[in-house]
Amino acid sequence: MEPNIETQLNAIQLEKPPIGFTSSALQELHRLYKELNVSDDAVLRIGVKGGGCSGLSYLLAFDKKEEGDSDYELEGIPVVMKKAQVMYVLGMEVDWETGLNNRGFSFNNPNAAETCGCGQSFSA
């Protein structure tokens, strides 16, 4: 019997977060961390959730750590992610854009089969 994906993901030991952040995204995260006066026990949650025009949408928010979260650190910011969601975002890069047409975090996900026009939703 072949192990399920959760068992396989539990066996993977990731030394760094499974996604990357550009320098502008890191700068914006640090700014938000200070501006929002995030509590000491808050962490940056990265992941996906159902919804959006393509089926899944990205999750990037300050939150509380939950049982079963994988822990990482990103330049002084504690980061958590559900192990089962790693397969959807492995290798993704998050950027912060400040152009005329777009302002906000953008997600470059090599695992996305389709994305929507807003860039916040995808299907795998």
Image (cartoon, rainbow, N blue to C red):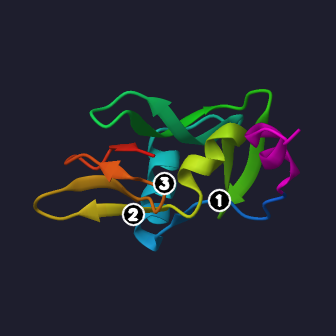
Q: How far is the residue under mark 1 from the one under mark 3?
A: 17 Å
Which residue lies at the image location 59% right of the left edge and 58% below the top edge?
Answer: 90
The label on residue 79 is none
Q: Residue 70: name its quadrant.
A: top right
Magenta span includes 29: no
Which residue lies at the image location 58% right of the left edge and 60% below the top edge?
Answer: 19
Residue type beneath disc 3: Leu
Residue type beneath disc 2: Asp
Q: Which residue is mark 1?
A: 18
Q: Which label's residue is closer to the chain start, 3 or 2?
A: 3
Q: How far is the residue under mark 3 from the one under mark 2?
A: 10 Å
Farthest residue, direction front:
1
Q: Secondary structure at mark 2?
A: strand
Q: Which residue is mark 3?
A: 29
User: Of discs 3 and 2, which sits in the foreground?
Assistant: 2
- For this rendering, which residue is in front, 57 or 63? 57
Span shown in magenta = 1-12
Query: How far across and how far down the image is residue 28, in percent?
Result: 42, 58
